[in-house]
Amino acid sequence: MSDRNPRMLDNDEFMLETSPRELTQNPLRKIWMPCRNGHIAHRRVCMTNCPTIIVTVGLPARGKTYISKKLTRYLNWIGVPTKEFNVGQYRRECLKIYKSFEFFRPDNEEGLKIRHQCATSALNDVRQYLSIEGGQVAVFDATNTTRERRGTIVKFAEQSGFKVFFVESVCEDPDVIAQNIVQVKLGSPDYIHCDTEEAIEDFMKRIKCYESSYQPLDEVLDRDLSYIKIMDVGRRYLVNRVMDHIQSRIVYYLMNIHITPRSIYLCRHGESDLNIKGRIGGDSGLSARGREFAKSLGEFLQDQNIKDLKVWTSQMKRTIQTAESLGVPYEQWKSLNEINAGVCEEMMYEEIQENFPLEFALRDQDKYRYRYPKGESYEDLVQRLEPVIMELERQENVLVVCHQAVMRCLLAYFLDKTADELPYLKCPLHTVLKLTPMAYGCKVESVYLGVDSVNTHRDRPENVNVQRTTEDALGTVPLHF
Amino acid sequence: MMRGCSSRPKLAQNQDRAVCMTNCPTLIVTVGLPARGKTYISKKLTRYLNWIGVPTREFNVGQYRREFVKIYKSFEFFRPDNEEGLKIRRQCASAALNDVRQYLTEEGGQVAVFDATNTTRERRETIIQFAEQNGFKVFFVESVCEDPDVIQENIVQVKLGSPDYTNCNTEEAVEDFMKRIKCYENSYETLDEVLDRDLSYIKIVDVGQRYLVNRVLDHIQSRIVYYLMNIHITPRSIYLCRHGESELNVKGRIGGDSGLTPGGKKFAKKLSNFIQSQVISDLKVWTSQMKRTIQTAEALSVPYEQWKVLNEIDAGVCEELMYEEIQDHYPLEFALRDQDKYRYRYPKGESYEDLVQRLEPVIMELERQENVLVICHQAVMRCLLAYFLDKTAEELPYLKCPLHTVLKLTPVAYGCKVESICLNVEAVNTHRERPENVEVSRMSEEALLTVPAHQ
């Protein structure tokens, strides 16, 4: 929605225009925009009026970085440019070598000075990102355990015209904390040269350094701040003064995520009749090989011995046929339907090139934002898949039987892929991806179930110019019958 | 997203398996002193859940009391030492719970909202046991507020007009009600962070300034929390209208992406005048991504936001056809649509039911916003209107949303005031009533009887 164009009217000029302007449809995104003398006057649609800085609060090993990274990944996926700034990283770059918890002692003047400098440096980068680089949200990830430090950040935000939203994580469950240390601290650069026992001992002492000065967000003293306090890994939440849409979405997201171990299985339907013919879209049934895959999928799942597996499909025949073969209940989601190719539905790439060479070229130029005439774009897909992602976050073990473009979108969310990478992610038929959340990311296991199929992946050709030859356009079309 | 189902999860063998939001029914229980917005929340939540397809009903114990006691004399009825009163109130609560059980176990209800003060731990414990015995989940919604202005406003908006006070003047009513509140205050045990840590609940403090959320157990509770955290009571108005008359409109064709006719452009100008005359503070304007709504908004000379989800219903293979052509080429489809216009999905297109699902984020954002003008389309406007006016799935697809008419919706008391403003620019009629004969075997004439005139 934010087209960069040489001649953009700003809001003031926009408001001065009195006569109704002509509309022109952007050829790539199929968005109607007013134009005057061929120039586009385009208003960005903002989720927020001004940038937001999310500030984490909490003792070490309370999941602040986990939350920061996950939130950043989610916001970027839904199209809100977000970046995290981990003060610990700055400290590691400044200090080079971590010796021991002594660095964090509250009476260590040298340490305090360095940590203060690192926080300042990070805030400067935040300002740069939000004011100059087009960022919308910055996640400032540090302990921020004193009211004084938070006051500094609030002032900084006020001066720069940013909104502030605090995310505090409070937890006293020793098991959770121990698990946290094992998962993400032992492997930290700080502890590369320590054995497990030494590392844990040092880290516990590190936590102690913060405890005496910790001032949690207070219902009374901090009643004018906007924040969410997450208690005991999501058992309880305190939400104060949610100011706008983005904060509301952030709260909703944070209240739906959990850390219970589980796996998400993603795969496409079995090979379909239209797949074999090299045609896109449509609502065809499975080919013989597709049915074979469905059977193998059933066997694979039984071997995996998954507890309480939920199975989701789209409302298209080929995914439902695949799920039917599993012999377990499944849920149909219309929002999991394949991308709507509009006028190109059921065409071969060769036919698209023949009938709509301009469209075909535009798609190669910007596959993420390109919208098929009377159809959808990957960008549209992400929007309609957001409730699926939200529910996947709530659930535990789930198998999603979907489609190529849909699977690319879901995968991009879990693997933090950019909008440019997303439409070219490889999601071949008859292959299951098993995603298991691990530390700050996601482990991916790719399981090919050994049933042959056509390849439906078309790489971006070298020549994406509108005047390219047919050969250039069709150079990367995969084989089909 | 999901369509609610009114029965337990079915096996995959059934065609068109509805997706369940909850495994077992849920009982939402309000908690709070009088005049804290419990009934407002109950009714709004019920309306929202029904609109997204979750069969929900509210059970207001005060109603049961009014039916029982017939004539309300004074606050004395609610005195904690009034044995007779206590007995009646307990009976009313039991009667209401029985109806809840009936609704959730026999009538296919998914959610029941039990609206009463429920201010003591003892009363809430009774309800929990009742729910456990019947296999219902319980979710408490407590409203806590000590702001005297808010309470005063509440009393003026919804208590003065209550059947309890028809024969009182304002001063008497307010005085009596304040004493009524006092009757509850001594025994009020608010949901406690420690004592009630095993319960699932949301505590709303000071009309949404702060929320405490404890143990959200499932999807529906998560959606309820999200909804409650987005609503507000700041006075505002929502304006709904369609685009100006379009080229395809005058040809009697549905869908497509055509531009405005001269009449449509005239409407857009008048809309601009109208909006200016309303002197609306901070009006947000939303359109779809179709040319005709954007052209309409352009005439307003104010910034507007384009939402793809506000696009008109996708008529699939019937896009840009006249009803006569649909009858000609797809008589079966045409009949099926008349049989169940809400659930009917065009081949390669959408149903009204699909529309509601994709409009849910619009409704959520409308709840967050204040003054908004939504320029949209016939089917879309019907869906939005049905939400605000609590229309059923059967009524929704036949709501009248004529061209060149603005509906101004202003929340008032427990509902919505509607003002219909026709901007006096002629336009075709695009409203097709349900014909008498919806049988597949019907004749063309019968099918096309209710098609509105066009060029």
Image (cartoon, coloured by chain):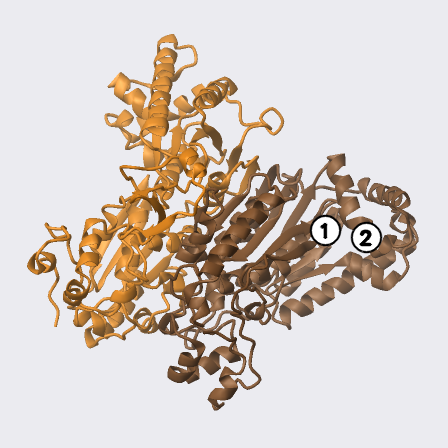
Chain colours: A orange, B brown
- Near-viewer residue (B59 or B269): B269
Mark 1 chain: B
Which image quarter holds the N terminus of chain A?
top left
Please name the residue shown 35% across and 41% down the image.
A41
Tell me residue A212's x, y (percent): 50, 19
Please name the residue shown 75% across and 63% down the image.
B96
Please name the residue shown 73% across and 66% down the image.
B98
Measure the alpha-carbon separation of dots 2 and 1. 9 Å
Tell me residue A163's x, y (percent): 47, 29
| Marking on residue B413 | 1
Tell me residue B382's x, y (percent): 55, 63
| Marking on residue B161 | 2
Q: Are marks 2 and 1 in contact (CB under 8 Å)?
A: yes
- Near-viewer residue (A110 or B299): B299
Please name the residue shown 59% across and 67% down the image.
B400
**Does residue B13 appear left or right of residue B397 in this picture?**
left
- Near-viewer residue (A268 or A109): A268
Which image quarter holds the C terminus of chain A?
bottom left
First in sequence: mark 2 or mark 1? 2
Which element carries disc 1, helix, strand or loop? loop
Which amino acid type is marked by label 1? Ala
Q: Quadrant of residue A399?
A: bottom left
